[in-house]
Amino acid sequence: MRNLNLEATVWNLFTSLELFEAAAHECEGTMAWFGTLAIARQTANFGRNNQIFDTFKALARDFRRSAELARLGDYKAIWKTAGYVRGDIRGMMEQPLHSWMTEAEYREFEEVRISRLMTYARLIKHSLHNGVVGAEYFFHPNPDCPERSNDDDGFPEDSIVKTYESNLHWYKEPLFPKLPEPLQEYVIDKSISCQTGDEVPWTGVWYPATGLEKHSLTFAIKGLRMQPAFRVTKTVEELKRESDGAIVTDPETVAVATTWHPVIPSGRMIDVDTNKELQAKAVQACPRAGIWQPMEPSAAQRSYKENETMADLGSAYGITVWRWIADR
């Protein structure tokens, strides 16, 4: 069952100033490591190595400047900076580094330092993509490739949680801190709505009126146009079965216009495992007496007794999912 609190927490982590600053710090650390090594070897390729050193220096500068702009509400620069990293790295790796690095040094450079930077860039780019250009792609598809407007280049369904979990312990030095325990509780603010295409009134994580079944939360940016939601039409597993074992990394999605609501902290903390137990679908027996909040944004809270049947609100977006709020 989907965990709104966990997903919202990870979205906020991947779009945080702390993560942007961590990317800049990663560039600075690699710049210093590479420069010290190159000078110690007094390599013949000083000019090329100096270009690599300067590239890390420029990336660190751009990440920090972009982070400051994000602090002021402008996320386009940090999204663009993250997008440049892959091309810059490709140019570096085409240089004859093997001619002066030992095998261990080359592995450290490629498999640890470059890999870490690429991961930071990927997290930032995917987290911000739909918020920055999702509406533009939806309303003005590329005439040469119009079907691309249906591709979710963010984190489809709950894949952002899987991404967090797979990267948390991948490196010896963590890319980001482990999420706090207990988690901050998040609620859907039904008093604020924003339609796809309208101007976003608030920067942060948003919940689609489609519900989360086959959809995802997203990060939207104040002043830009609201993006569409993306519905998963075929999962990665389904596509793999259809492609006779071909490598498939992303699900098939379709973009749909919808209404969005902000996801905001309630001020309460909630245990991850407890939160999973305190959710129930319609027609299931209520697992705990108290006040329950439907995930459906337009529906009101209800009081249930233990083992009482949870109501189905007849949503057009799928079966109703209820979340325990408090004792009566």
Image: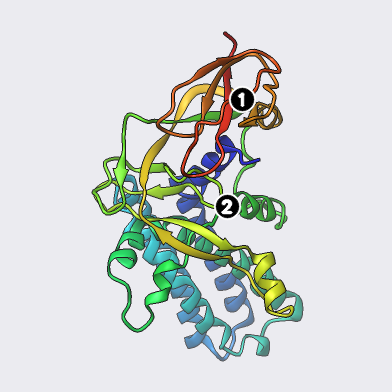
Residue 285, position as x, y percentages in the image: 70, 24
Q: Name the residue under label 2.
A: 160
Query: Disc 2 versus disc 1: distance between alpha carbons?
Result: 29 Å
Residue 63 location, quadrant: bottom left
Image quarter where the C terminus lies is top right
Q: Tag 2: residue type? A: Ile
Residue 26, position as x, y percentages in the image: 54, 59
Q: Check the image and report above or below for 18 versus 58.
A: above
Q: Report the residue at 72% width, 72% height from top.
A: 241
First in sequence: mark 2 or mark 1?
2
Name the secondary structure under disc 1.
Answer: loop
Q: Give whichever of 15, 256 is nearer the camera.
A: 256
Residue 134 location, quadrant: bottom left
Q: Report the residue at 49% width, 43% height from top.
A: 211
Q: Does the image show residue 152?
A: no
Q: Mark 1 points at which residue?
A: 310
Q: Check the image and report above or below for 141 versus 262.
A: below
Q: Tag 1: residue type? A: Met
Residue 299, position as x, y percentages in the image: 43, 28
Residue 32, position as x, y percentages in the image: 55, 65
In this picture, residue 12 sits left or right of residue 202: right
Give the residue furthest to the front: 314
Q: Give whichever of 169, 240 is nearer the camera.
A: 240
